[in-house]
């Protein structure tokens, strides 16, 4: 939070998100009753300076977190990611089995073809709106190339 | 415990090479008596293991990433298995939530989302622990954060139980549908060969 406040003071003018590119934002349909599901996308920094993704907000959810799934010796665990550094030219993939936006406490069930409105928050105070499309679940998974 | 160690070694060796979809146990493992239920009053007990192949998966409903992916792939894998084996050898799929406190009120809906024949249950802590241990699986409820939310760690692999009620194999990520189906079909052939000996 100190970092964000400092960044806001240092950069008082609103920044456009021209050098951050989001591609393929999706939310796979989730089972009824699921209290959490995930959004996936890729995020590319096309600018000259590193960016720090520090949070995400989601309309229609109690909470949204940036999470990472880890598989270690047959144990799956998840951890919260507080800060995600994206170097100039770097693409960060949010994909199944790895980094994902965890959407918690949906106010209503997902509808195929609908959208989930996300707002990515960066350390410099910038925000980036993202419309993620609700899509059917596809076996083989997202990001596994099958 | 020796069986467990052997299995773990096989699993680790397996995960090192890409695209190993399953590991057959050296020796079949007997399942203890157990009983799970859901909010519709349906139950899943050790009796349900007899006479059919069963895939048992542990997870929890707040699992945003891995559980839906696993069940989605199991649906495709079971469909592919259906093209390779007799209809009565198509495995049943049972999802067991290890998080009854949050999931018990609507656990039945979860697995059905992936296939109408998939079933999901939960149960008391000692029943969960019994089946977790019997299948050499793992879970842990993590410490709640300041909002009361907690993460759940669990095994990524799922258990394959033969019609004689014994654990025979583990399926493991990435659960490629075609290769998983191939593994299951081969496992069934080996099982029948063993029975006829």
Image (spheres, rainbow, N blue to C red):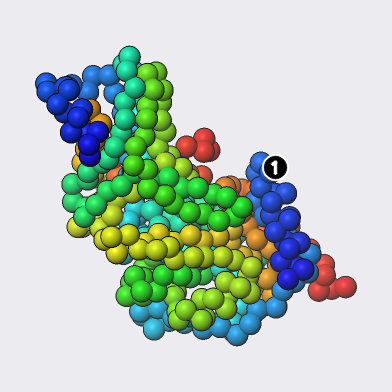
Image coords of residue B165 (percent x, y): 67, 77
Visible in this render: residue B51? no
Image coords of residue B114 (percent x, y): 43, 59
Question: From the viewer's perspective, is B69 left or right of B171?
Answer: left
Q: Is residue B13 above or below residue B120?
A: above
Query: Going by the picture, which residue comes out furthest to the left?
Result: A13
Instruction: Name the foreground residue: B71 vs B127.
Output: B127
Q: Is residue B67 above or below residue B46?
A: above
* Residue at horizontal 61 percent and vertical 73 percent from the top: B133
Query: Going by the picture, which residue comes out furthest to the top?
Result: A48
Instruction: Place residue A18 in its image quadrant.
Output: top left
Image coords of residue B156 (percent x, y): 55, 56
Q: Which residue is mark 1?
A: B17
Visible in this render: residue A145? yes
Q: Is residue A10 above or below residue A109?
A: above
State which quarter of the image contains the N terminus of chain A.
top left
Q: Is residue B112 above or below residue B178?
A: below
* Residue at horizontal 52 percent and vertical 81 percent from the top: B127
Image coords of residue A45 (percent x, y): 34, 22
* Residue at horizontal 51 percent and vertical 54 percent from the top: A76
């Amino acid at each position: 939070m100190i970092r964000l406040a400092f960044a806001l003071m240092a950069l008082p003018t609103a920044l456009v998100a021209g050098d951050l590119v989001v591609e393929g934002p999706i939310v796979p349909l989730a089972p009824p009753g699921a209290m959490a599901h995930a959004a996936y996308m890729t995020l590319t920094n096309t600018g000259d300076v590193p960016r720090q993704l520090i949070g995400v907000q989601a309309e229609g959810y109690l909470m949204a977190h940036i999470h990472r799934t880890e598989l270690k010796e047959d144990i799956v665990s998840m951890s919260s990611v507080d800060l995600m550094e994206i170097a100039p030219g770097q693409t960060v993939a949010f994909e199944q089995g790895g980094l994902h936006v965890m959407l918690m406490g949906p106010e209503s069930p997902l509808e195929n073809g609908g959208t989930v409105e996300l707002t990515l928050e960066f350390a410099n105070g910038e925000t980036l709106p993202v419309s993620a499309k609700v899509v059917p679940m596809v076996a083989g998974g997202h990001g596994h190339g099958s | 415990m020796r069986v467990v160690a052997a299995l773990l070694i096989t699993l680790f060796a397996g995960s090192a090479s890409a695209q190993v979809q399953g590991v057959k146990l050296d020796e079949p493992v007997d399942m203890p008596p157990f009983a799970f239920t859901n909010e519709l009053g349906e139950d899943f007990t050790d009796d349900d293991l007899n006479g059919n192949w069963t895939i048992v998966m542990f997870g929890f409903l707040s699992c945003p990433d891995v559980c839906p992916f696993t069940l989605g792939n199991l649906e495709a894998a079971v469909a592919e298995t259906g093209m390779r084996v007799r209809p009565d050898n198509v495995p049943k799929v049972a999802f067991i939530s290890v998080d009854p406190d949050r999931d018990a009120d609507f656990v039945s809906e979860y697995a059905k989302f992936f296939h109408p024949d998939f079933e999901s249950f939960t149960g008391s802590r000692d029943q969960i622990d019994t089946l977790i241990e019997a299948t050499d699986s793992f879970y842990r409820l993590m410490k709640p954060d300041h909002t009361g939310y907690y993460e759940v760690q669990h095994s990524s692999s799922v258990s394959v139980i033969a019609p004689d009620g014994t654990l025979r194999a583990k399926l493991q990520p990435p659960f490629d549908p075609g290769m998983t189906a191939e593994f299951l079909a081969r496992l069934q052939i080996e099982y029948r060969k063993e029975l006829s000996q």
